[in-house]
Image (spheres, rainbow, N blue to C red):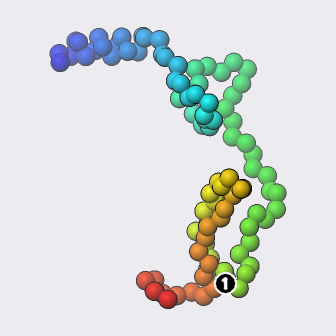
Amino acid sequence: MPARALAALTLLAALAPAQPIDIASRRELFVDRHLIHSLHNAELRLATPRYEGPVFSLDRPHEGPFSGYLTVIAHPAGFRIYYRGLPVSRPDGSTD
């Protein structure tokens, strides 16, 4: 494609009105301006975290100080947390 035609297409694409993005009834997290056309008397701002106390503690005998890799998954009955419980340290590659 000749350079002039490519430049003309690029200019036309930039001048064309943007079509709305259909998100149906999905919830969308607005972390950038991709889904936002304009902001009037508003701004994008991250919330300030606040300490609400411990959420989860690894204090059972089968867990121990070498537990980790917590993953929280939404479930119809609430949330589930999957993690690795390891009461003692073992060398990498250990199968026991």
Which of the 4 quarters of the picture holds residue 89? bottom right
Q: Nearer the viewer, residue 69 or 15?
A: 69
Task: Name the residue: 47% across, 11% down.
Answer: 17
Task: Name the residue: 50% across, 89% down.
Answer: 96
Spot occupied by residue 70 in the image (x, y as percentages of width and height)? 62, 66
Q: Amino acid at mark 1?
A: His
Spot occupied by residue 74 in the image (x, y as percentages of width and height)? 65, 54
Would residue 45 appear left or right of 90 to someone viewing this image?
A: right
Q: Nearer the viewer, residue 64 or 4?
A: 64
Q: Nearer the viewer, residue 34 or 24?
A: 24
Which of the 4 quarters of the picture holds residue 61? bottom right
Q: Is residue 85 above or below residue 9?
A: below
Q: What residue does disc 1 label?
A: 62
Q: Is residue 48 above or below residue 69?
A: above
Would residue 18 appear left or right of 50 to someone viewing this image?
A: left
Q: Is residue 25 above or below residue 62?
A: above
Q: Residues within 10 Å of mark 1 (few under 14, many from 20)?
A: few
Task: Name the residue: 58% across, 28% down.
Answer: 24
